[in-house]
Image: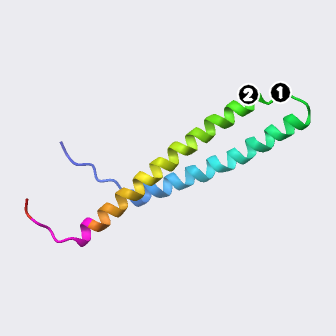
Amino acid sequence: MPKVDLDWSKELETCQVRMAALETVTVSQQQKIQRLLDGGMDAEFTKRVLLQIEQSLERLRKHKDMIETRITRVRLQMRLPNHPA
């Protein structure tokens, strides 16, 4: 089976763009919750949506950490001399 060679830098960039988008949505949802509460309205649905967004953001953070670890590993491997196994 052929080895898949990913462009980890591109993956990291994509992850960072998604995280920025979710962070923007998070702020928007927090403001919406505040407006609902200020207006004496029920904000439970919006709170649940916010929780899902925050969970997605946490998964993206973990994914970003994994990508950064991979990039570091690849860079270290490029510096080490090749030793036959």
Q: Is residue 58 left or right of residue 77?
A: right
Q: How many numbered circles does the render carry?
A: 2
Residue 47, horizontal then vertical, whole percent:
72, 33
Q: Which mark is residue 42?
A: 1
Q: Which mark is residue 45?
A: 2
| Image quadrant containing the C terminus | bottom left
Q: Is residue 77 left or right of residue 27?
A: left
Q: Residue at x 73, y 27 (%)?
A: 45
Classify mark 2: helix, strand or loop. Answer: helix
Whether residue 28 is situated above or below residue 6 in the rendered picture? above
Q: CA distance from mark 1 to mark 2?
A: 8 Å
Q: Amino acid at mark 1?
A: Asp
82 inside magenta stretch: yes
Classify mark 1: helix, strand or loop. Answer: loop
Of residues 80 and 13, the one nearer the viewer is 80
Q: Residue at x 68, y 33 (%)?
A: 49
Q: Is residue 15 left or right of residue 74?
A: right
Q: Is residue 84 left or right of residue 9?
A: left
Classify residue 65 by image quadrant: bottom left
